[in-house]
Image: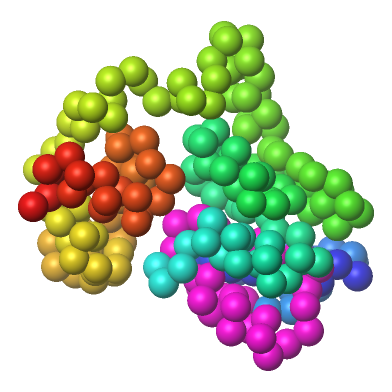
Amino acid sequence: MIKVLLVEDHMVVLNGIKLLLESQDGFEVVGEASNGKEALDYLAANPVPDIVLTDISMDEMDGIELLQILNKQYSSIKVVILSMLNQINYVIEAFEYGLAGYLVKNVGYNELLFGLNHIANGGKYMSEEIAMILLDQVKSGQSYAQALPEGLQANFDISERELEVLQLIAEGYTNIEIADKIFLSKRTVEGHRQNLIEKAGVKNTAHLVKFAFERGILM
């Protein structure tokens, strides 16, 4: 029996994955968490699962930070990311931190189950969409360092709304708090945060804020 801890802050997605896995004889969903911090709290008080299936973009602690901690403190756990993000820089960074699998959320049920089974048996897996993007980069001669368009870091062309979100991020507000302050949905704020990280060519929110201050975008 493959024991899985689900880490996902969207209940519809979480419940859908849970129903799918629990309909299979070989899987057991042993716990649920809405962010990385909750996942660590669960692990501190319960038996260690075989797989942690996590999103990337979450409040409190995102999936990449959770992956880094699990890699150091729970090396027996196989971490699998299931995310809307298909940017290759995230994929490469995650595998550098010991990731076992990377799947995008539009993956089919059969591929999801195949990937999880393969990972549970000691393999590594990335979804077909990610593999095709990597193949296209190899065919075009594009490298990881070239993944962002030339000059994008220097120009950092952002909208007024993105600047507003950036200022609130720098002040330490969460996605939910930012959404409440400027009357946007949490998902829209997440999108703005992700766009800012991509435009800056940085790895995470902390680097984004540092970048913004160093470039004089924030004072």
Instruction: Tell me what residue is drawn at x 51 percent, y 36 percent.
Output: 89
Q: Is residue 140 above or below residue 31?
A: above
Q: Position of residue 59 (x, y in %)?
A: 40, 68
Q: Position of residue 65 (x, y in %)?
A: 52, 61
| Apparent side of residue 162 relative to residue 57 in the rendered image (left or right) | left
Q: Is residue 118 above or below residue 20?
A: above
Instruction: Tell me what residue is drawn at x 60 percent, y 78 percent.
Output: 40
Quarter of the image for residue 131 reads top right
Q: Position of residue 159 (x, y in %)?
A: 14, 38
Instruction: Tell me what residue is drawn at x 60 percent, y 60 percent.
Output: 68
Residue at the far front: name it: 214
Q: Is residue 13 above or below residue 60?
A: above
Residue at the far top: name it: 140
Comparing 180 with 20, the one in front is: 180
Quarter of the image for residue 125 reads top right
Magenta residues, start to end: 32-58
